[in-house]
């Protein structure tokens, strides 16, 4: 096994272990981080004119945002869940367009929106996290 293959396996095990051990709040943090990482990677591919890799990175970010959207608890979340649902839908549509137009400014717009959500999510007090259950975990 070469070093690159070993590193890939290590990363897969590390991510699986993190997911297995994470509470629902942490899982959402991981999804937000993953989407932001994919978009940063996509921007790099855009700058290097690597169209195929850019498309894969943006598609991965869109899928992660879809996962965030699917995790919304519309019954318990009220207006917040409804607003996030609309915002996630908007972000996905914008990223589709950014991919078509190869537009870094649109990617930056979505990164800014995701970052704002991440900041708010990270500030949820520990006591409030105890009762949190995404819709997909109910």
Image (cartoon, rainbow, N blue to C red):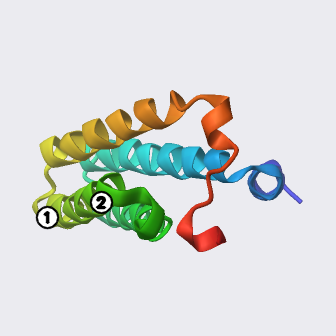
- Tell me residue 122's x, y (percent): 53, 31
Position of 40 relative to 134 (above/below): above
Q: Find numbered disc 1 in the image and state the secondary structure of the residue it sits on.
A: helix
Marks 1 and 2, how far apart at CA: 14 Å
Residue at 17 percent of width and 58 percent of height: 98
Q: Mark 1 or 2 closer to N-term?
A: 2
Where does the C terminus fall, quadrant-wise? Answer: bottom right
- Tell me residue 68's x, y (percent): 46, 61
Q: Is residue 2 left or right of residue 111?
A: right
Task: Spot the residue most to the left.
Answer: 101
Q: Nearer the viewer, residue 66 or 101?
A: 66
Badge 2 local density, few (<14 within 10 Å), some, or many (20+)? many
Q: Nearer the viewer, residue 59 or 18?
A: 18
Badge 1 local density, few (<14 within 10 Å), some, or many (20+)? some
Q: On the image, which quarter does residue 134 sit in?
A: bottom right
Where does the N terminus fall, quadrant-wise? Answer: bottom right
Disc ID at residue 88: 2
Q: Is residue 5 left or right of residue 98?
A: right
Position of 20 relative to 122 (above/below): below
Q: Is residue 75 left or right of residue 102?
A: right
Discs 1/2, front: 2
Disc ID at residue 97: 1
Position of 112 relative to 52 (above/below): above
- Tell me residue 46's x, y (percent): 26, 49
- Tell me residue 43's x, y (percent): 30, 44
Residue at 52 percent of width and 49 percent of height: 34
Q: On the image, which quarter does residue 93 sit in?
A: bottom left
Residue at 16 percent of width and 56 percent of height: 102
Q: On the image, which quarter does residue 94 sit in?
A: bottom left
């Amino acid at each position: 096994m070469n070093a690159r293959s070993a590193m890939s396996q290590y990363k897969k095990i590390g991510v699986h272990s993190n997911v297995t051990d994470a509470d629902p709040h942490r899982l959402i943090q991981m999804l937000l981080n993953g989407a932001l990482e994919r978009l940063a990677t996509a921007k790099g591919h855009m700058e290097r004119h690597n169209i195929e890799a850019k498309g894969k990175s943006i598609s991965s970010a869109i899928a992660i945002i879809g996962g965030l959207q699917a995790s919304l608890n519309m019954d318990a979340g009220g207006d917040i869940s409804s607003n996030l649902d609309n915002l996630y839908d908007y972000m996905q549509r914008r990223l589709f367009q950014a991919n078509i137009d190869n537009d870094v400014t649109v990617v930056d717009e979505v990164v800014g929106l995701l970052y704002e959500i991440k900041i708010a999510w990270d500030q949820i007090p520990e006591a409030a996290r105890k009762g949190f259950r995404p819709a997909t975990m109910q």
